[in-house]
Image (cartoon, rainbow, N blue to C red):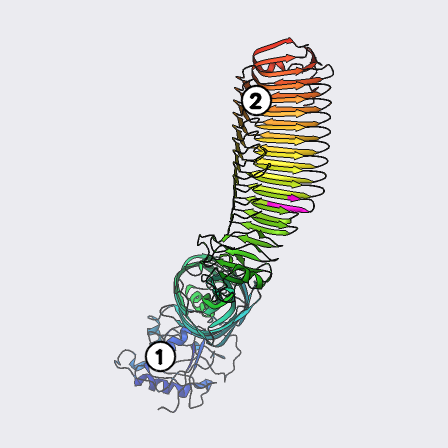
Amino acid sequence: MPTNKLMRCLYITCPLLGALTSNAVAQTIEGAATDLPKTTGEATLSNTPDSLAESEQTSQNQAVSTWVAEPETTLTSETVKPEFALSPDIVSAPQPENNPTSDTAQPEFTPIPATVLAPKSEIMSTPERVEPEFALSPIMTFAPDSKTVEDVTPSPDVESEASLLSQTTDPEPVLPTSETAQNPPIKVLPRFGGNFTTGSGVGYSSSFGSLEGFVPLSQTPGSNLTFLEGRLLLSTEDFNLGGNLVLGHRVYNAEANRVLGGYIAFDNRSTGNSSFNQVGVGFESLGESWEVRGNAYVPVGNTRQLTAETISDLGVSASDPFFQDNFLAVTRNQQQQLNRRFEAAMTGVDLEAGVKLASLGQTGPLRGYAGLYYYDAPDSDEVLGWRTRLEARPTDTLRLGLALSNDATFGTNLVVSVGANFPGTRPRGLSQDERVLARLGESPQRNANIVVDEQVESELLTMQDTVFVTNPFTGEPWRFQHVNLGLGTGNGTVETPTATVAEALAVAQPNDIVYVQPGTAPAIPAFTIPDGVQVLSTAPVQRIDTVELGNVQLPLSGAGALPEVTGTVTLGNDTTLSGFAVNAVPGAGIVGTNINNIVIRENAIANSTAEGISLSNVSAQVEVTDNTISNSGREGFNLNNNLGEVELVLAGNTITDNGALAADGDGVNVELRNDATGTFDLTNNTITNNLGRGGIADGVDFKLFDNASGTANLTDNTISGNQLNGINLDLEATTSGTLNLTGNTITGNESGGLDVLVSNDASGTFNLTGNTISNNKLRGVALAFADRTTGSINLTDNTISENQDDGVYLQLSDQAQLNANLSNNLIARNANNGIFTSTNGTAQLRFLSELNMITDNGFTGLSLITLDSARTLAAIRASTLTGSNFSDIEVLTIAPGTTACLQPTNNTIGSLILDDSVGGPIQVEAGTLPTNNISTSDFTFWSGTAVSPGTCGF
């Protein structure tokens, strides 16, 4: 290697330093170097092609590189006479002269890239390359101190050669600009931010917010990044916490202009009932135009947790009841449903691809995504769904999201998210490659919440036991004394029943049931039922109320054979007799005196020499249902109270052919005296052919005397063929009574259908609705009010027809007061009058007829007769009165002190007779007569008195 070498090159813009190609060049430089002044620096010129290429690359990345020749001798300014010439590739740039120099100043040269130094003698003739023995080193900027290249005086040969070369050199050198200099690589900075996401979504129901931080752990700007991201999640519904911790690594692939990355994550979520953990992994490939990513989620730890447990009673089913000892037992199956609620974290994956849809300003894109997700957990249905979403970044710090998902488990969910981070991740003015490179710092896109499925498990529990059924009124088990007539040999258990009713009654306690099977014994003699005991046979269907089973049928019941009783049955308080044939008893069949709360049902009571049932001074509840009472010597049913209050229910009975041995042999007789009160409900009874020896047997006879009071409700009964009236009612003294007849059929009785007598100071109200009263031997309905009585009768929607006397008969005497209201009735084909009223003394009748059909009666349709000093006020409206043989309407006053006031409007009248010739005036409200359609009128004996409208008081 030569001992003296010196070369100073200021390497500014040219891409390549010319190669030194020959030994002659090197020798020339050596010779010249002995004459050069001493340099201020050291340099080694590399003579390899690799060094030249490296120099070219470096020149592209640096604004200025300095190359310094490293001499081995000291030169002075006086000896600078280099004997070398610039090759045709060299361009020598003059340097400024503003540096003060001295005679000993050290000249500096600025070599232009692509310049080749060559010895003078071998520029044109040396074909082979000579490698110089020096190298260039980029150490410092090297500028001339005192002289330019022109200041160095070359030898004549050199000048000549330079002159020749100057004709072929390039023109001006190219200087660096801002376009040719590259921006520094983007560096990812730490940041923090927040996000809000609406609920519900896949695997969660509540909106939630988050605080997040992103920290670069290691990075090579422009190349790769390792980062840590953490999130704290808070639900808005119940303020439950959760969190994510993500460790990720990303690299930038310059050739593909893509960011490739992966991560591992640890997640936590509290639901308020459970706490779950999971690990996650994911990958991503991010570009400018498209991207793809995938995530996997694996719960760890306790992934399924019980949150609630409830037990619901589904009810009790039971076997058919059976007797055991003295009790009624049942095998009970109590069913319960055990419901357990679990929360289960689900393992899952999701995959999505997205494309850039538009650019928002200078920093942000609008991207669209579509993908699938799949989740599963033990005891859950598999979840396969799709998700589409939009993501917009209108500024470097703001994120907006809108997602729509659907699956069979979590349904359809629309989710909105808003987020912000500081600082941003994308400065303005980035090139396309730099925008992709900037994605090194984005947050990974993954499901922030652990997906949790709510599960319900149900289990049916059945508990079986045998219990004795309980009396709901006492809270104690029902107890039975068993009787098998003639066959029993024991103590009253079902296994060893007694042989007689008397034995069972002897040991029966209150609330016991004496349960009688017919056996083979002869008839049961008379017996008395102790207080609180029921005597039931197996003949009818027997049912009792129980706590466990509700109303239940007793075993063995419904056998059909009634055990026979040949003596009187005497009832006690709170007793029941059911299912016996009480037959041929000398005296009353069933008796109860001074007792309360009794039940007589489903018995056959026949051929008693006195009453079938006789009750005296009974109070509280009395139920007589579904019995047959026949051929009793006196009344079929008799109740006679002098005190107390009774509620009688008489329903479903057949009461027939009673009274043959007595003058008064009513089917049903009820008498209240003194201060006794009562309510009597007679429903669905058949009361027929009751015949008293004295000819005074009514089907139903109510009598209230003294200060007694009562209400009788008769509904849907059939009352026919009785010797006197179908229904008879007597109210005397200061009594008060109400009779409500609804839906009854009262036909074929030997006297009247309904006969009412109200006398002294009594008062009564009578409501007849929807009844059929026909073919009775006298009147259909007859009411007589005497003395100082008051009352009202309301007849609505009844059919009163074909009775042998009047259809309706109303008689008032003395000071009686009666309001009669008749509406929508059919009163037809009665043998005498359809309606006949007779008002005597100083009595007053207020009579209103509306919408009635009164036709084809034997004498008059409507006859209003007023006598003495009585008053009759009548309004007849919108009714049809035709076809009667004598007159359809007849109004008569028969004494001078009488008054009749008539208001007839809008009626159809076949014939009308007004006659006040021997009595007080018949007043007709002015203008009313012309409103009627009157076929024939006879006013010969009428005074023609007209009064102003409203005078009659209607």
Image x and y of residue 631, in percent: 52, 41
Tag 1 secondary structure: helix
For disc 2, the marked residue is 834
Instruction: Let me know if residue 647 is in the magenta part.
Output: yes
Disc on res. 52 = 1
Task: Decide: is 296 above or below 20.
Answer: above
Q: CA distance from mark 1 to mark 2?
A: 144 Å
Instruction: Let me know if residue 911 is in the magenta part.
Output: no
Q: Nearer the viewer, residue 207 or 649?
A: 649
Image x and y of residue 859, in percent: 56, 17
> For the residue carrying disc 2, how many other residues have a C-alpha within 10 Å: few (<14), some (14-19), or many (20+)?
many
> For the residue carrying disc 1, how many other residues have a C-alpha within 10 Å: few (<14), some (14-19), or many (20+)?
many
Q: Amino acid under label 1?
A: Leu
Closer to the eye: label 1 or 2: 2
Left-right relation of 278 to 51: right
Q: Which residues are magenta?
A: 640-648
Image x and y of residue 407, in percent: 41, 60
Mark 1 or 2 closer to N-term? 1
Of the 4 image quadrants, the one containing the N terminus is bottom left
Q: Amino acid under label 2?
A: Gly
Q: Is residue 160 visible?
A: no
Task: Name the magenta segment's main secondary structure.
Answer: strand
Task: Decide: is 600 above or below 3.
Answer: above
Tag 2 secondary structure: loop
Image x and y of residue 539, in percent: 47, 53
